[in-house]
Amino acid sequence: MSGLTRREFLGSSAAAAAAAAATSGGLLVGCTSAPAAESSVPGGAALGPWIQITPDGRVLVWADKVEMGQGTMTGYATLVGEELDLDPARIEMIHPGVDARFGFQNTGGSDSLASSWLPLRESAAKARARLEVAAANRLGVSRDELSVDDGRVVHAGSGRSLGFGELANEAAALAEPRDVVLKSPDQFRFIGRERPRVDAAPKVRGAAKYGLDVRVPGMRHAAIVRPPRRGDRVERFDAAAVLGMPGVTDVFEISSGVAIVATGTWQARRAAAALPITFARGEGPRPDSVEIRREQDRLLSEESGRAARDEGDVEDALASSEQRLDVRYFTPHQAHAAMEPLNCTIIPQSDRVDVHLGTQGPTAAQDIAAHILGRSREDVFVHTAFLGGGFGRRVFPDVVVECAEVVKHTNAPIQLVWSREDDTGHDFYRPATGHRFRAGLAADGAITAWDHTLVAPSLIPSMGEDIAGAFGPEWMRGFLNAAGGGLAKVLPRLVGPIMALEGASDQPYAAGSVRVASVLHDPGVRVGIWRSVGHSNNGFVVESFVDELAHAAGDDPLEFRRGRLSEHPRHLACLALVENKANWGAPAPGRHQGVAVYESFGTVVAHVAEVSVAGSRIRVERVTAAVDCGRAVNPDIVRAQIEGGTNFGLTAALKSAVTFRDGAVVESNFHDYAMLRMNEAPEIEVHIIESDAAPSGVGEPGTPGIAAAVANAVFAATGKRLRELPLRLDA
Amino acid sequence: MTIAFKLNGEAVSLDVEPELPLLWAIRDELGLTGTKFGCGIGQCGACTVQLDGRPVRGCLTPISSAEGRAVRTIEGLDPNGRHALQRAWVELSVPQCGYCQSGQLMSAASLLGANPEPSDLDIDAAMSGNICRCGTYGRIRAAIHRAAEIVREEEGVS
């Protein structure tokens, strides 16, 4: 089970819930009920689930995988434009509402383009076939005399042509062909080309609408005061003390804290800061980072864990090895820190409710708003705005729960905006993890034994929270949530922290014997998925430890990897490309290089980091990356994502950590939870391996390896092996 | 109290509390949403606007300090969205999620206004107050250089 991806997990949760329902006499789960009305345009003819064409020739494509910066809209427009022979820049990309035709809508796992590569092109090719047949009928010619050019179907023989818009209704009335022939790669005009992003223009004019930008008449603004410690409760608050403040209209308790409603965002925030409030201690644990680290260390000493991979006899192999290593690595909690603080706007009306937010999971948002407001799902319309960063945080619908509760109390249009402090202090954090590696080397440098034990919590409880019910029809919601909640309690004990093992249990290096095991340890922190999930930790520890082995073997770190990856040609190709492009072995004067190569989400990325060290200061000067993501649909977006993923990983490598003290998060805002800035961002060069394989994702794979590449370069510079993030030389 | 100032070239007046931050005056009172809220403590630059041509953090600037002055937001950077920086940003596909880019552009516009040919160090100094969580820094740097080049080319032509 260790290879379970998020998508498979979500799917398997639904399947488990469905199975549970079936055995208890319920009906099968399969469709989420939702109206199609919000995912169509007036007068638009639907040609398949994604594409609509209006009579005036606009081509609209529904981005059921949401745009949070990773370039989905550009990728979708490229795939559709390719099969329609239409410039992707002329396609209008729109986020759909919750719509059964898209199934359970959730964006994550770097799979948006990978999963749509064939279906979207097929759908577009079928749309084109129908447009051509409609034109052939209208013109009284054979379809094979027709061609398509710039939104028109053209009969070259007679010089006549018809626009897509003129043909759309007739085309939509035709039966969809069962089979179509997709373009072959040598026919590609847009796929594989450097093309501008389709969403850049509104984003440079301040015109792109994020959740925070929704404005409706009479809208009021809410802020929430929450207990700083998860599990604590509101004990007492003095509403009267702030009700007199300018603009404040309501102060009341909701499930997560106390809501302040005011005429403006700032007025609500000011009153929240002034509210006299005390909290009562809850029953739950009070996580503390020092304690967590100590406990992880103890478990690594005392527990052998549950094996996810067990090949050969590691103990025997260790005993007969020429050299043995036994080291520990640790990673801290991390917050997502998307630039747009979480927010949600809900507009209640007598016959409908409109929910506006940037979300990776609109299906769950609809379900929750409907449930809390006592409406039917079909009366709740989710409008997905542009996301001001997602990184996994916007999968979780907690802000919808809060906003819906405020709306339930006020029955008014409400915009709830979290503060940066709320965002830092109440996240679904990347888990802190502990790792013990034991390995043996033979005299010739062969890895005789590889034994990796990690300590981590399960992500399943938080991923199941409030989401399971949205997988089935509305009437099963309660049951599914109960089943999901039950599963979330049982599953971690049955399967261990499976997502913490990705990239560890399947580490690619050849070794005589391999054991990878996990110890489940839940210190009570609300954890979640954070750009590249388990890979974000394992990229650091696995690729740092391999570097230790290389140095112990007296080998060049890149050569050492190459020698043990003979069965992984894509890794080898990335290593060779980065070796060449980074000028491996010949860094600029005063600089030192470190390498890492790592696969995640079907994509392999090799990084070479070039760093300089002055005293305790680590400066990453330059990063060279090589990426194999199958066919690059848009090479420029591939590069942008690897650049961005690398910088995201550098923040975690060099800058930030979330610290728990007595149950509360110490850090609060960017002054103490620091992000990489312009003056610290290295020059990044990304090189893409030519490939005919189907595309794999690029949103996350740039992140996992970079911390190790930097740590390995720091070792090259100083001889100091840093085994803990963020990397600190002064310790 | 009534505060009168120019917003993107047009005279506006607001009857609000003098300590209301410029960011929220622009967003909540005047309805221009291109200027973003990111941190509220002047650490991220998402709310950067120009006050008499100089970059300020809207979240920390009380509206009273705009009295009689000129405020420029991303919506006012260019009437047609064709400022050299905006063109360079599109040409180099700088934005990812795009949320921070209004602030990035307003900081960059202030830089170019004062220094038409900034060096990398000048860019570091002017732009390090603006966080981009998507990590578009390399492209922002390249786009500022490109915008400077566009301005030079067009001035050379005219």
Image (cartoon, rainbow, N blue to C red):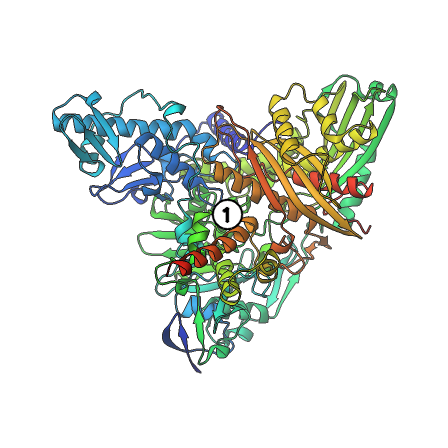
**Callout 1: SS:** loop
Q: Quadrant of residue A152?
A: top left
Instruction: Please state which amino acid type lies under the numbered disc 1.
Output: Pro
Residue B61, how many percent across, how many down?
A: 53, 73
Neighbour tally class for label 1: few under 14, some 14-19, many 20 plus, Cα within 10 Å: many
Residue A148, how many percent across, how many down?
A: 25, 30
Q: Which residue is at a point 37% across and 29% down the rendered structure image? A: A121
Whether residue A408 is visible to the viewer of this picture, yes or no, is no
Residue A410, how many percent across, how many down?
A: 42, 62
Q: Quadrant of the N terminus of chain A?
A: top right
Residue A484, how many percent across, how many down?
A: 54, 36
Q: Is residue A235 above or below residue A344?
A: below
Query: Taking A329 as reference, is A493 left or right?
Result: left
The number of discs equals 1
Query: Taking A458 as reference, is A193 left or right?
Result: left
Q: Nearer the viewer, residue B117 or B45?
A: B117
In the image, farthest residue toward the bottom: B1
Q: Which residue is at a point 35% across and 42% down the rendered structure image? A: A89
Q: Quadrant of residue A546?
A: top right
Q: Which residue is at a point 62% across and 39% down the rendered structure image? A: A624
Query: Taking A146 as reference, is A2 left or right?
Result: right
Q: Which residue is mark 1?
A: A397
Q: Chain of mark 1?
A: A
Q: Is residue B95 above or below residue A234?
A: above
Q: Is residue A214 above or below residue A452?
A: below
Q: Quadrant of residue A345?
A: bottom left
Whether residue A287 is visible to the viewer of this picture, yes or no, is yes
Q: Nearer the viewer, residue A308 or A673?
A: A673
